[in-house]
Image: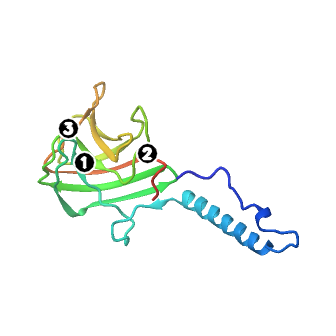
Amino acid sequence: MTLPSSMTFPSPTQYIQEDGEGLQAYLQELTHSLEGMYGDLAANVNGGWKTDKSGQQKTYAPAVFGTAPAGSGTYAADRQIGWSLRQGLLSDVWFDVTWTAHTGAGNLYVALPYLVAQSSQKPFAGVIQTGSIAFGGYLVCNAIPNTRRCEIWGCTSGGATANIAIPASGQLIGHIRYVGQREERS
């Protein structure tokens, strides 16, 4: 959600008659409108943490998938943790995920908690630390526009970047900041 740029207040003419009655109702409605506007502003400025399904922790459970088919894997209980902070449209996502026996194929990606903004390019790149995944050069993660995917790409000095195929087991630790879509709330 973006910050409001204007506010429509209740019209005093629908509350206040010639004899002055209705002023209290108008002031109550005006107060209610101002409180709502302040709440929306505070929620956007302060941001919102993505929570797990029980609502008890301020985390989300990151998972890895392949692009075709997605597949599934077994996750280490102490290594499938993520945090997501959303402030307005800006989303910060941190994750630490370890998996084994994954059945997916195609390119490796981490599921994101929010939709990535529409873009004709891939302007949102993040950092990756890995364990037990063989690659040449270094890795980055790219938030793919209009999806909930953070694809893992290999890069080399002077060479082309390319998607990394999903391995049967591995570990990814990373962070990405991206612009999300307006329709979603934290």
Q: Label 3 sits on what residue type?
A: Phe
Secondary structure state at the residue bearing disc 3? loop
Q: Is residue 60 left or right of residue 74?
A: right
Q: Which mark is residue 91?
A: none
Q: Is residue 20 left or right of residue 4?
A: right
Q: Quadrant of the C terminus?
A: bottom left
Q: Label 1 sits on what residue type?
A: Thr
Q: Residues within 10 Å of mark 3 (few under 14, many from 20)?
A: few
Sequence order check, earlier mark of 3 and 1: 1
Q: Would you name the residue on which mark 3 appears?
A: 135
Asked whether disc 3 touches disc 1, contact meaning CB atoms under 8 Å apart, the reply is yes
Q: CA distance from mark 3 to mark 1?
A: 10 Å
Residue occupying image coordinates x 55% and y 61%: 43
Q: Label 2 sits on what residue type?
A: Tyr
Secondary structure state at the residue bearing disc 1? strand
Rendered view: 173 above or below 124: below
Q: Position of residue 1 (x, y in %)?
A: 52, 53
Q: Position of residue 133 (x, y in %)?
A: 18, 45
Q: Residues within 10 Å of mark 2 (few under 14, many from 20)?
A: many
Q: Would you name the residue on which mark 2 appears?
A: 178
Q: Would you name the residue on which mark 1 appears?
A: 130
Q: Residues within 10 Å of mark 1 (few under 14, many from 20)?
A: some
Q: CA distance from mark 2 to mark 1?
A: 21 Å
Rendered view: 76 above or below 105: below
Secondary structure state at the residue bearing disc 2? strand
